Amino acid sequence: MRATRSAVLLLALCATAPIAGCGRGDAPPPAARGDVGAVGGTLVLTVPGAPGSLLPPHVRTIPSKQITDLVYERLAEIGPSLNTIGDEDFTPQLARSWSWSADSLAIAFSLDSAARWHDGQPVTAEDVRFTFALNQDPAAGSGDRQYLRGIDSVTTRDAHTTVVWFARRYPEQFFDAAARVSILPSHLLRDVKPADLRSHPLATAPVGSGRFRFVEAVPNSRVVLAADTAHHLGRPKLDRFVMTIAPDPVTATTQLLTGNADMYEGLRLENMAQVARTPNLVARIGPGTAYSFLAFNLRDQGDTTRPHPVLGDRGTRRAIAMVVDRQAVVRAVMDTLGVVGVGPFSRALPVADPATPQVPYSAAGAAALLDSLGWRDANGDGVRERAGRPLSLVLIVPTSSALRQRIAVALQQQLATVGIRLEIRQLELNAFQEQMAARRFDLVMGSWVLTDGSPSGLRSTWGTGGTQNPGGYSNPAFDAQVDSGNAAFDRERRRAHFSRAFATIAADVPAVWLYEPHNAIAVDRRFETPPLRRTGWWLDLAEWWIPADRRIDRDRVGLPSVARR
């Protein structure tokens, strides 16, 4: 499913007052620090399914985001605290420094004059102005447009100074200006109609200013990136990054275990013993930033102005939630690779509230509640009916997620114990996304990946009219608390508003919060890495390296080949 900048996959920096700036330090680039064998080598990552568009405004999948985060840059990047209030927890990227106006309604960004697009053209202030204008244009279809409403305009002061102007003060001004969008090359896109962006060559062959440049994309086979050896932030230590595309998770895992790939990040419980038996692999497991859910379609599929004939009733939704034994599912399917979910958030989110009220598990209570609502098994076929309508529902899951498919089967078995028939419909990823967007389902097992610490994405994923709201949930009380939380500068007040929002949505039961998966990654032992960021291991890929005595053939030629095992 979609990876969002704020739905939902970092360095300390100098703190600044509202009118101060923050400049980049003078640390030498990685290759200049005297590390033995610091430069060279190839990382081959295997992924189950091809990435989509490689233009940042249209990124919808994790593989696409991984590529675009490496090829493009933002003005600044969020720090490890995931604090999005103010600017003290951000580190410079394209912006060398910045300063606030006295009234805090403008931020001037000074761009690094050494920054270059991968075609050799300089990065300019016009590129920044163009990028914001494009993302704010409805015709462009940018997924970030909804988050840029607080930005009034963007102007250029000179070739390397951009000023972002705001209509009002709010806590995430700097985040919206510096870290929401990846800067695009205006000299390549200025003559393109926004509505034509999806078919532009840059959607499959991007030209950015990031630490890695695009080399080639072979459909349904691989995407290859190479180090930008003259990058303004320093040369990456690796020479190449190769993303190989497998048709499914089983094939991707096989590529890893047989040495045709160096890394896979979709480990399942049954893979852990296999990885442990493979000498050249090591598993790395840690808290992630994703959460997965079973969402109810609250609207009639034939007429969205009417409630769903079954799931539009909160009592029925609550009964379904009561029969789902989340602890048993997570324990059986995930073991130590995940924890039970507690709300529409990852515990990594700064405003997360693990004490959010939960629908208690009780199969007997669920049966009694269904009886009281008129759902009874009148003909003895094991499926409840009401007014001649069987309590039969369709759940859609993507074929790209073996984990969700297994959990779907467990849910099917649990619901059957109280007379609810669940049909599982497995869909290829694109078809799954299309049906979810069109709300052609009764239930959907989805997952949001939070790629930053902003809670503003809750308005999109669960707020009234949200563009990523899977089931059409709407409650003005929830919207009001989210809006108040997003407007609060004080962190405790912010948390209090979101806690009330989470309690409100929990009582309405638009979804069952199933689990939070851990980041479960297997990587070849020849790689030396910094600590992996929970918001995305690839964000520090420029600092990965392979000591010279550990390199294999593909580190020299840059193409996948069977590794020594």
Image (tube, grey):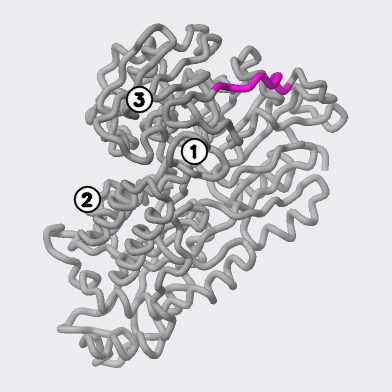
Task: Give the image location of residue 162, x and y in percent.
Answer: 38, 16
The magenta segment is 23-30
Residue under label 2, please give it.
Answer: 465
Identify the residue shown where x is 76% and y is 22%. 39
Image depth: mark 3 or mark 1 in front: 3
Q: Earlier in the sequence, mark 2 or mark 3?
A: 3
Picture layout, residue 408 above or below residue 48? below
> Seen in the image, is 188 located left or right of residue 379?
right
Task: Name which residue type carries label 2.
Answer: Gly
| Towards the viewer: 318 or 560 | 318
Identify the residue shown where x is 85% and y is 25%. 36
Residue under label 3, please give it.
Answer: 102
Crowd band around label 3 with a 10 angstrom C-alpha radius: few (<14), some (14–19), many (20+): few
Identify the residue shown where x is 29% and y is 60%. 441
Crowd band around label 2 with a 10 angstrom C-alpha radius: few (<14), some (14–19), many (20+): few
| Towards the viewer: 493 or 482 | 493
Q: Earlier in the sequence, mark 1 or mark 2?
A: 1
Residue under label 1, please give it.
Answer: 50
Distance from disc 3 to disc 1, alpha carbons, whole Å, reads 47 Å
| Towards the viewer: 277 or 226 | 226
Q: Residue furthest right?
A: 549
Distance from disc 1 to disc 2, alpha carbons, whole Å, reads 30 Å
Q: Secondary structure at mark 3?
A: loop
> Seen in the image, is 542 located left or right of residue 441?
right
> Is residue 285 in sight in this rendering?
yes
Task: Name which residue type carries label 1.
Answer: Ala
Task: Give the image location of residue 159, x and y in percent.
Answer: 41, 7
